[in-house]
Amino acid sequence: MSSIDSEALDQLFCKARTHNGWTAQPVSEATLRELYDLMKWGPTSANCSPARLVFVVSEQAKARLVPAMSEGNREKTRLAPVTAIIGMDLEFYEQLPRLFPHTDARSWFAGKPVAIEQTAFRNSSLQGGYLILAARALGLDCGPMSGFDAEAVDREFFPEGKVKSNFICNLGYGDPARLFPRNPRLAFEEACALR
């Protein structure tokens, strides 16, 4: 496998930004399906794939979501063409006989709430990261957020109780005029160690 070119790296990482404002350009259902079909290939432990997504696109669904957002996240969520709720299925292990069939992986989790919670959270977070990279690869901009009332979101969008919200990400075509100045990142020496 060879490295991707610098233009692709810029699109995915170096020049990609977290967007707070959006153009009116819609995001099609076909694009959202393509987005999922890319992100689903990212690795998860034992292929557990616990992420469950709700793409909030209608005005009616936005009206249910926006009140659960923190004050600073309400308007940008209301105006985003799509808001993805990244949830974690706490019964993900029921799919393991199909997703990881060569061993009894279901038994690793059934009746073990700590293992279920940790695995669902860790791997749905990974899948949310894959969603962001897949969106950027398709030319979409992203605005991931953790400022929301998770219990209110769960009541509205996951009422059966087996899925819990992890984080939220606005998707669309960002308005560059609404970007904040880029913040710094830690240097290698500050964040990494070689042992």
Image (cartoon, rainbow, N blue to C red):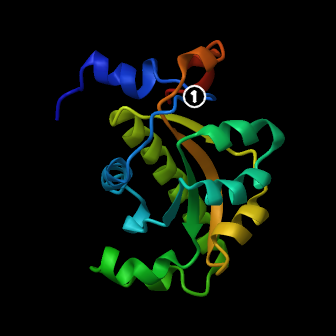
**Amino acid type, label 1:** Thr
Left or right position of 63 against 163: right
Query: What is the secondary structure assignment of the residue under circle 1?
Result: loop
Say above or below: 43 vs 145.
below
Q: Relative to residue 156, is residue 170 depicted above or below?
A: above
Q: Residue at x 65, y 54 (%)?
A: 62
Residue 179 seen in this snapshot: no
- Considering only vertical position in the picture, is 159 above or below 127? below
Residue 109 point in image, percent of width and height:
53, 80
**Depth check, front residue: 60 or 86:** 60
Question: Residue at the spot x=37%, y=54% of the render?
Answer: 36
The structure residue drawn at horizontal position 38% and vertical position 47%, both measured from the top left corner, is 28
Against 143, residue 151 (above or below) is: below
Tell which of 191 and 96 is nearer to you. Answer: 96
- Percent x, y of residue 77: 66, 42
Residue situated furthest left in the rendering: 1
Q: Is residue 5 visible?
A: yes
Where does label 1 land, which residue? 18
Q: Position of residue 140 (x, y in %)?
A: 42, 34
- In this view, the residue in front, 37 or 33, is 33
Farthest residue in the right direction?
71
In-front residue for pair 109/178: 178
Residue 92 % position (x, y) = 49, 75
Classify mark 1: residues with Cα within 10 Å, few (<14), some (14-19) or many (20+): some
